[in-house]
Image (tube, rainbow, N blue to C red):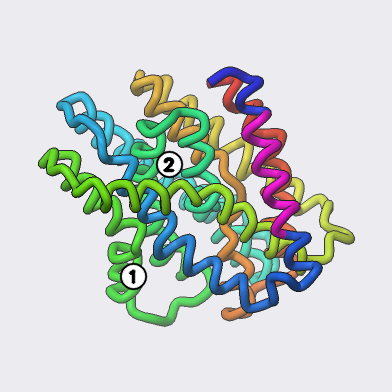
Amino acid sequence: MNFSSLINLQAEMFLLLIVGAVLRKTNILPGQSKDILTDLVLDLILPCNIVNSFRREFSLETLTSFLVIIIVALAIQVMCYILSRILYNKEEPARRKVFQYCTMASNAGFLGNPIAEGVFGAEGLALASVYLIPQRVVMWSAGLACFTDTGSKKEAFKKATTHPCIIAVYIGMALMISQLPLPEVLGKTIQEVGSCTMPLSMILIGTIFADIPLKGIVTVPVVRFTLIRLGLIPLLSLIGCRIFRVDTLVTAVSVLLAAMPAASTTAILANKYGGDVEFATKCVVFSTLMTLITVPLWCMVL
């Protein structure tokens, strides 16, 4: 994908974000619409998009790429976990919880998949879907533990591995490996529903932004975190991939998803478990806005 096309994709996403914010500000989408849109995207739209991304010819090279990106994703999650434990020890507890969680958990589920598809096509989306498996497990296990040590680890693991997006990966891989054709009407329906991923995801993020006061969002701690999340983590990921001579496309997808902003769930968990909600919101908003600059830069590097 050339640079001009990438800029157009970023502009399209930004305009969709504005649409979501306007719809929320004018109350066309009421407050509860955020929960409805979140469930719709995560439980239907995105899973359909993931399943459709696997509907292609299967080869040994494809299976190798999936295994490699799983290993790379695991290594990146281990690195993020280590960084979360050593970088924020001097922070106050409420803010430290936020730092640790959003260092381990990015918004790759919402932003990463549409960007990977836009930049690398269906193959990139399939790789991105596999990449997200370890992150989803970490988000609901070690990530959740950042805010609370209570709760069953078994339940957290179950929640992660039975997430609709993960189930979609299982189904998609089964279809690809078996090369089982779907009835035309079913395949077309899945494709059409999945094509709504980027518009609805960005509109949803826009509705979230609309309810957030932007005054005082740019602070030293927020900027420092954003540099770690959007700069240091993908840089270390790129260096590791280059050292071990990982396939070019696997490297590009892995680094691009490692460069995603703080997870939107950060503020929700901070509110529920006594974290710094205002700071969590600022981290999510500012790091997301900065991807409009950093994602094109990383794509140029890759």
Residue 9 forms part of the magenta stretch: yes
Q: Which of 300 and 89 is in front in this view?
A: 300
Residue 74, can we see it?
no
10 Å crowding of disc 1: few (<14), some (14-19), many (20+): some
The residue depicted at 61 percent of the width and 24 percent of the height is 5
The residue depicted at 68 percent of the width and 60 percent of the height is 90
Instruction: Relative to 136, say whether 112 is above or below.
Output: above
Residue 156 at x, y percent in the picture: 35, 71
The stretch in magenta equals: 8-20
Residue 258 left/right relative to 289: left
Residue 137 left/right relative to 260: left
Residue 128 at x, y percent in the picture: 40, 40
Foreground disc of the pair 2, 1: 1
The residue depicted at 42 percent of the width and 53 percent of the height is 193
The amino acid type, in three-letter code, at marker 1 is Lys
Secondary structure beneath label 2? helix
Residue 205 at x, y percent in the picture: 64, 58
Secondary structure beneath label 1? helix
Residue 225 left/right relative to 62: right
Mark 2 touches mark 1? (CB < 8 Å)? no
- Judging by the rendered image, the residue that carries numbered circle 2 is 76
Instruction: Kindly give the residue lying farthest to the front in the view shown.
Output: 185
Instruction: Relative to 113, say whether 135 is above or below.
Output: below
Residue 60 in which image quadrant: top left
- Judging by the rendered image, the residue that carries numbered circle 1 is 159
Residue 112 forms part of the magenta stretch: no
N-terminal-most mark, 2 or 1: 2
